[in-house]
Image (tube, rainbow, N blue to C red):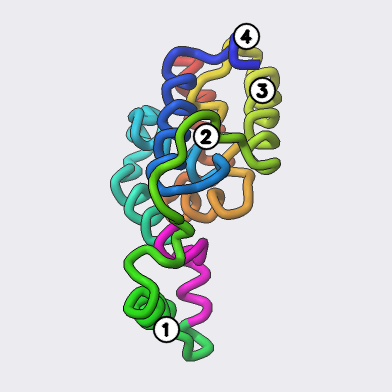
């Protein structure tokens, strides 16, 4: 599968593995793939005026909260649940990053992809085929992530939902 990836797309996957390893994750999830894209630049996002450091910060907050996204935290606030207060209390008792899942030093060696990440990469290939591309680039991974639960809302809240991204990718190809 990876033989069709551009150098930039491969680098994004490598960065995803680095992010997963540094955070102590035992698998590479879609959020790691998005973090990898953000670390390598993701030109389509820049063209849309999306601040990639905002995405990186949200992904870090979500990881610290044990997977609770900003959207989830906002929804819980409506029920009187202060997620940040809960995280702080847990960290007071169990240490910083306790909910992030880090269990000791970063894992060495191969880190597998989650089923959802594998689905994301398969969807990336389908996106490339739909666009008539023979290569798989960062833009195809981004289109796939815009369709995956968890990463879709991170992108959509910044004006980079699937349809907007698809139009931007098509305009890039045409221009």
**Mark 1 / mark 3, whichever is N-terminal:** 1
Separation of disc 1 and disc 4 at Cα?
A: 47 Å
Mark 4 sits on what residue?
A: 134
Label 3 sits on a secondary structure element that is: helix
Residue at left offset 55%, top offset 45%:
26
Furthest residue to the front? 104
Where is residue 2, by image quadrant? top right
CA neighbours of label 2 inside 10 A, class few (<14), some (14 to 19), many (20+): many
**Mark 3 / mark 4, whichever is N-terminal:** 3
**Mark 2 / mark 1, whichever is N-terminal:** 1
Separation of disc 1 and disc 3 at Cα?
A: 40 Å
Separation of disc 3 and disc 4 at Cα?
A: 9 Å
Residue range corresponding to the magenta coloring: 63-76
In the image, residue 146 lies at what x, y percent? 57, 43
Mark 1 sits on what residue?
A: 82
Label 2 sits on a secondary structure element that is: helix
Q: In what quadrant of the picture does the N terminus appear?
A: top right
In the image, residue 5 lies at what x, y percent? 55, 15
Q: Nearer the viewer, mark 2 or mark 1?
A: 1
Mark 3 sits on what residue?
A: 125
Label 1 sits on a secondary structure element that is: loop
Q: In what quadrant of the picture does the C terminus appear?
A: top left
Label 4 sits on a secondary structure element that is: loop
**Mark 2 / mark 3, whichever is N-terminal:** 3
**Mark 1 / mark 4, whichever is N-terminal:** 1
Residue at left offset 35%, top offset 43%:
50
């Amino acid at each position: 599968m990876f033989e069709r990836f551009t150098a930039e797309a491969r680098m994004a996957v490598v960065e995803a593995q680095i992010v997963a390893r540094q955070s102590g994750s035992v698998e590479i999830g879609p959020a790691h793939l998005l973090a990898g894209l953000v670390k390598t630049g993701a030109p389509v996002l820049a063209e849309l005026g999306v601040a990639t450091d905002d995405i990186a910060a949200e992904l870090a907050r979500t990881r610290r909260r044990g997977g609770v996204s900003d959207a989830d935290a906002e929804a819980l606030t409506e029920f009187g649940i202060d997620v940040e207060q809960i995280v702080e209390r847990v960290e007071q008792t169990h240490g910083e990053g306790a909910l992030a899942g880090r269990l000791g030093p970063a894992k060495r060696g191969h880190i597998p992809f989650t089923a959802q990440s594998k689905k994301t990469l398969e969807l990336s290939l389908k996106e490339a085929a739909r666009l008539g591309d023979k290569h798989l680039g960062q833009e195809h991974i981004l289109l796939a992530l815009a369709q995956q639960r968890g990463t879709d809302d991170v992108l959509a809240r910044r004006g980079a939902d699937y349809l907007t991204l698809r139009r931007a990718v098509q305009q890039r190809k045409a221009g």
